[in-house]
Image (cartoon, rainbow, N blue to C red):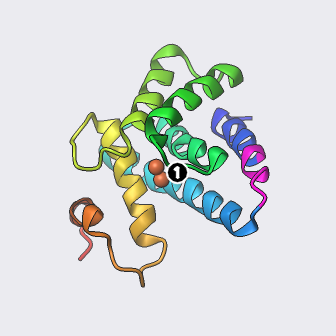
Amino acid sequence: MGRLKELRNYINGELDKIDDVDERTAATVHLYGVSLAAVILAKKRGLNEELAAMAAMLHDLYAYKTASYDDHAHKGAELAGKVLKELDLTNNEETEIICSAIYHHDDKNAVDSPMEELLKDADVISHTMNDPSKPVKEKEQLRYDNVCKEFGLT
Ligand SMILES: [Fe+2]
Ligand SMILES: [Fe+2]
């Protein structure tokens, strides 16, 4: 089994613990949606697709596990580190890349490293494109516009 599949199996198990069916569905759709967007962005930007997908699968797990977004990016990076260590799927350098992307994913106004930027943009793609009838939030407009430009979308 590939390591992305192995990570997804673990995350599916964690998502199964969410009692509320709507919440569970929303969490699943978001993590898999961000993961797909992350792979597309990684391909476009010449970054590691597998690490991008793994970071995306883990990026909001803390929030879903605790039902709290309080400092969820920083706490989520810590959780991701523990999960990756437990599953033994990544070397130290890869773990650091994934955890750093998760750590910074809520700093949408800052510009960070390419993988950190990728996760922020993938998150914004999920927020803005999962339901095109919803207006784009002001705080996500600039990233949304830049991603559309990058892909030649109007
Ligand atoms: Fe988040
Ligand atoms: Fe997210």
Per the image, the residue denoted by label 1 is 35
Q: Nearer the viewer, residue 38 or 83?
A: 83
Left or right: where 23 falls relative to 35: right
Task: Please identify the quarter of the rendering in which residue 61 is found.
Answer: top right
Any part of residue 117 in sight: yes
Task: For ligand 2, tell me if the residue under mark 1 lies within 8 Å.
Answer: no
Any part of residue 144 in sight: no
Q: Secondary structure at mark 1?
A: helix
Q: Quadrant of the N terminus?
A: top right
Q: Quadrant of the C terminus?
A: bottom left
User: In the rendered structure, which segment of residues is drawn in magenta?
Assistant: 13-19
Place of residue 74 in the rendered image (x, y in percent of width and height, measured from the top left): 44, 34
Place of residue 4 in the rendered image (x, y in percent of width and height, measured from the top left): 63, 38
Q: Residue furthest bottom?
A: 133
Q: Amino acid at mark 1?
A: Ser
Is 42 magenta? The answer is no
Q: Is residue 131 above or below residue 74?
A: below
Q: Is residue 150 above or below residue 97?
A: below
Place of residue 142 in the rendered image (x, y in percent of width and height, measured from the top left): 21, 62
How many discs mark residues in the rendered view?
1
Crowding at dot 1, Cα within 10 Å, few <14 / some 14-19 / many 20+, comes out as many
Left or right: where 57 falls relative to 144: right
Left or right: where 139 falls relative to 76: left
Residue in view at x 78 percent, y 52 percent: 16
Residue in view at x 72 percent, y 51 percent: 15
Q: Is residue 33 above or below residue 73?
A: below
Task: Please identify the quarter of the rendering in which residue 129 is found.
Answer: bottom left
Residue in view at x 53 percent, y 59 percent: 33
